[in-house]
Amino acid sequence: MPQFIVTWLMTALALVVTAYIVPGITLTGFNAALIAAIILGLVNAVVRPLLILLTLPITIVTLGLFLLVINALSIQLVAALTSGFTVDGLLWAIIGSLVLSFVSSILDSLIGKNPDPT
């Protein structure tokens, strides 16, 4: 359970940093980031795999670059479902997904996440 809370807080912090860096993404506060982090986790667990499966042919043709669009659509879906979290368009969502991935990987390396808690 503590690992879940740490992951949730790190995702929320990564969203705050991303909103600070990317001008087309806005968050009204850390509470909105916490809610967006939960919804992002649910979207990444349920919706994103379905999108990847349904768009597999175009992903193969584009050599995986279409995954950027899927990530951006996931972020836009989270913004649509979360009050206080807005994304101004698909381009900002693509840039935001790249920045979010980069910031998340930096935060994960800083706290030294252990993939096997046993």
Image (cartoon, grey):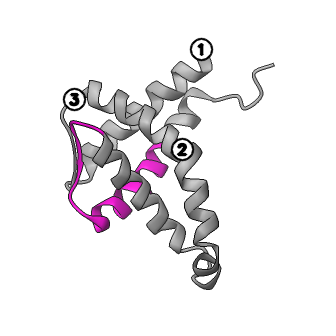
Overall secondary structure of the magenta section: helix
- For label 2, the residue is 105
Tell me if mark 3 has few (under 14), some (14-19) or many (20+) residues whose alpha carbon lies within 10 angstroms of its own. Answer: few
Report the Cα–Cα distance between label 3 and label 1: 23 Å
Check disc 1 and give the amino acid type: Pro
- For label 1, the residue is 2
- For label 3, the residue is 29
Q: Which residue is at 29% across, 38% downward?
A: 82
Give percent across and percent down for residue 41. 51, 38
Tell me if mark 2 has few (under 14), some (14-19) or many (20+) residues whose alpha carbon lies within 10 angstroms of its own. Answer: few
Q: Which residue is at 54% across, 28% downward?
A: 7
Report the Cα–Cα distance between label 2 and label 1: 19 Å
Check disc 3 and give the amino acid type: Gly
Q: Which residue is at 58% across, 80% downward?
A: 58
Check disc 2 and give the amino acid type: Ser
Q: Quadrant of the N terminus?
A: top right
Mark 3: secondary structure: loop
Vertical placement of 50 versus 43: above or below?
below
Q: Which residues are magenta?
A: 82-105
First reached walking from the N terminus: tag 3 or tag 1: 1
Q: In front here: 99 or 61?
A: 61
Q: Which residue is at 59% across, 58% downward?
A: 50
